[in-house]
């Protein structure tokens, strides 16, 4: 069964959350969440499915207060990061990427953890990846936040609808 494309992921997101005054689209050099007076905008990187899923995960777990801020109000320290800044980055990213794991499964995409730092030592990347996967296992047991679960189900349904159409069913 094939994975959903970035444009299919965005279309599912836009349809699923049409009542939330938010729109997702790709083609950008950098991802960004921009709150709006009328409509908020989620921009994902170029035409990458993983970026669309990642940005959707951030939106799905952000509370109302965070959704009022550009990029949800998170402090961003570009790499290379000090130990303290790396820990702050990972704490936010573990939550989003653990949701992304489950969204990627529903969309049929391969999840790749992202530390956003190509120079991070392998042992730190492996520890970060382990923490993401452990949090995803916890989320499988206790459930996802409401919007994340709604999107996960919508992705799964779209992927299976596409499969059924392709098989003539």
Image (cartoon, rainbow, N blue to C red):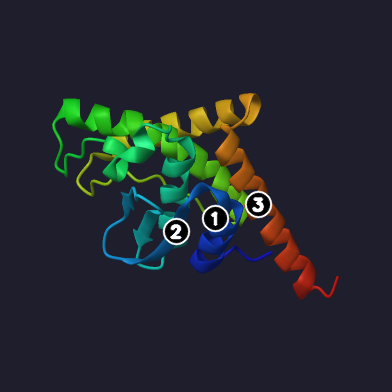
Residue situated in front as seen by the camera: 54 or 32 = 32
Residue situated in front as seen by the camera: 152 or 147 = 147
Q: CA distance from mark 3 to mark 2?
A: 15 Å
Corner quadrant of residue 169: bottom right
Corner quadrant of residue 90: top left
- The residue that appears at 20% across and 39% down in the rendered structure is 76
Label 3's element?
helix
- The residue that appears at 35% across and 49% down in the rendered structure is 37
Specify the farthest residue to the right. 169
Residue 81 coordinates in the image, percent (x, y): 15, 37
Which of the two marks, 3 or 2, is nearer to us in this view?
A: 2
Q: Dots 1 and 2: beta carbons under 8 Å?
A: yes
Specify the farthest residue to the front. 38
Residue 112 seen in the current view: no
The crowding category of the residue bearing disc 2, from other C-alpha atoms within 10 Å (few below 14, some 14 to 19, many at least 20), is many
Left of 26 or right of it: where is 70?
A: left
Label 1's element?
helix
**Image height check: is 7 above or below 129?**
below
Residue situated in front as seen by the camera: 100 or 83 = 100
- The residue that appears at 38% across and 39% down in the rendered structure is 67
Left of 14 or right of it: where is 126?
A: left
Q: Which residue was labeled with disc 2?
A: 24
Q: Which mark is residue 154?
A: 3
Q: Earlier in the sequence, mark 1 or mark 2?
A: 1
Q: Which mark is residue 5?
A: none
């Amino acid at each position: 069964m094939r994975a959903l494309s970035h444009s299919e992921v965005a279309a599912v997101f836009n349809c699923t959350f049409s009542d939330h005054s938010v729109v997702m689209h790709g083609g950008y050099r950098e991802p960004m969440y921009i709150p709006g007076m009328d409509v908020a905008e989620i921009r994902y990187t170029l035409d990458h499915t993983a970026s669309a899923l990642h940005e959707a995960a951030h939106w799905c777990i952000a509370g109302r207060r965070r959704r009022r801020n550009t990029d949800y109000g998170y402090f961003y320290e570009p790499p290379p990061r000090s130990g303290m800044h790396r820990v702050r980055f990972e704490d936010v990213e573990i939550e989003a990427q653990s949701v992304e794991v489950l969204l990627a499964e529903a969309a049929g995409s391969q999840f790749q953890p992202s530390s956003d730092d190509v120079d991070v030592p392998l042992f730190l990347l492996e520890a970060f990846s382990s923490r993401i996967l452990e949090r995803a296992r916890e989320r499988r047991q206790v459930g996802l936040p409401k919007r994340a679960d709604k999107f996960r189900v919508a992705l799964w349904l779209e992927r299976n609808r596409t499969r059924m159409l392709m098989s003539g069913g």
